[in-house]
Image: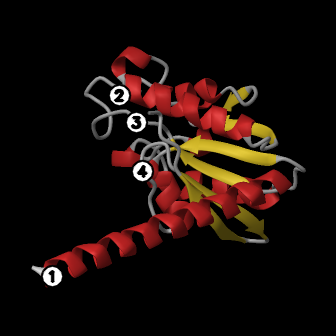
Amino acid sequence: MPTLRYLTLALLLAMSSIFSTTAQANEATWRALQEGGLVILMRHSLAPGIGDPPGFERGSCETQRNLSAAGRAQAQAAGRAFRARDIPIAAVYSSSWCRALDTAELMALGPVEPTPWLDSFFRGRGDQTSITQTAQEQIAAWQGSGNLLLVTHQVNITALVGSGAGSGEMIVVRPAGDEMQVVGRLSVSGQ
């Protein structure tokens, strides 16, 4: 049995190290955001399901997949985390899908501007090439003193940075000419 105890202890120490490293990476990302000039690519908060139901209409929330209560709490918690750390947000843009708009509005970080270059192109809902190219151009052009918050969808984020994001997760990037340097990832729980 001593071997099992040592194995359990080693596993606990390894997990503690992983959590500590993640916390340090999160703090470094928060510090970078305090300086401004970055772009935050955020996937909308938790909206259970995949895609949208039959009969989807962009301007009609009742026909869409929407935020759950946990998703609403997650968005509010993200906004509180930004305010608690004094993160400067210069502009907030969102997909026109209700779950993205609701996420951005519930964060309460400033006026939200819906824009088609953040709309989902999942299952052929939009022109992936055009949407991604316009988003890349908007990100590359960002030079604000604060940060730019973009609330969008998993497929859009994957097209932009090559990896997806969980519900409510944020990938922070630094515009660098025609490229983006990933600064870090952030996730805020609504619990």
Residue that label 4 marks: 166
> Dot 2 surroundings within 10 Å: few (below 14), some, or many (20 or more)?
some
Three-letter amino acid code at the position of disc 4:
Gly
Residue 37 placement: quadrant: bottom right
Q: Residue at x 74, y 64 (%)?
A: 174
Residue for badge 2 = 65
Is residue 162 left or right of 145 when viewed as pictured?
Answer: left
Q: Residues within 10 Å of mark 3 (few under 14, many from 20)?
A: many
Label 1 to label 4: alpha-carbon separation = 39 Å
- Res 170 label: none
Residue 97 visible to the viewer = yes
Distance (Cα) linking label 3 and label 2: 10 Å
Residue at the spot of label 3: 46
Label 4 neighbour load within 10 Å: few <14, some 14-19, many 20+: some
Q: Determine if residue 115 is in view.
A: no
Q: What separation in Å lies between label 4 and label 2 (alpha carbons)? A: 16 Å
Q: Amino acid at mark 1?
A: Pro
Q: Quadrant of residue 46?
A: top left
> Which of the 4 quarters of the picture holds residue 191?
top left
